């Protein structure tokens, strides 16, 4: 699978299928602080991502 990360912007590849929570764990990213998007759909931490998928991982940003 292709993984596009933002802040800092970079791209990685992983062998799949893998669960979203596992992907974030291996990248050292907290689940509660990141959004995972697959095929323009927001996916939950228990979703399984196939080997041929392209996903985006974006940090949750808040301000005030």
Image: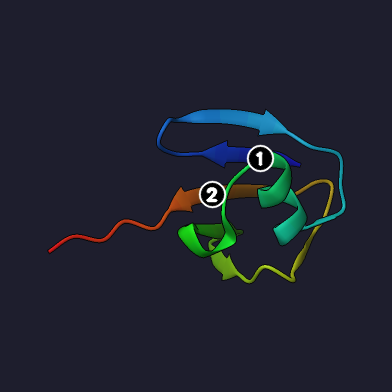
Q: Residue at x 45, y 30 (%)?
A: 9
Q: Position of residue 10 (x, y in %)?
A: 52, 28
At horizontal 66% and vertical 40% (from top left) the residue drawn is 27
The residue under label 2 is 57
| Quadrant assignment, res 60 | bottom left
For the C terminus, the image quarter is bottom left
Which label lies toward us, 1 or 2?
A: 1
Q: Residues within 10 Å of mark 1 (few under 14, many from 20)?
A: few
Residue 40 appears at what percent x and percent y? 53, 61
Asked whether disc 1 touches disc 2, contact meaning CB atoms under 8 Å apart, the reply is yes
Residue sitting at x 54%, y 68%:
42
Determine whether the residue tagged by mark 2 lies in a helix, strand or loop: strand
Residue 51 screen position, x and y as percent: 84, 47
When the figure is inspected, residue 1 is found, relative to residue 47, above or below; the finding is above
Quadrant occupied by the N terminus: top right
Q: Which residue is mark 1?
A: 27
Is 44 on the left or on the right of 15, as rendered?
A: left
Counting labels gives 2
Residue neighbourhood size for the residue with mark 2, other residues' Cα within 10 Å, grouped as few (<14), some (14–19), many (≥20): many
């Amino acid at each position: 699978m292709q993984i596009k990360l933002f802040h800092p912007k970079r791209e990685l590849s992983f062998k799949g299928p893998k669960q979203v929570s596992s992907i974030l764990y291996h990248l050292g990213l907290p689940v509660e602080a990141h959004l995972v998007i697959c095929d323009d759909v927001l996916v939950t931490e228990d979703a399984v991502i196939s080997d041929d998928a392209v996903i985006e991982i974006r940090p949750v940003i808040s301000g005030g």
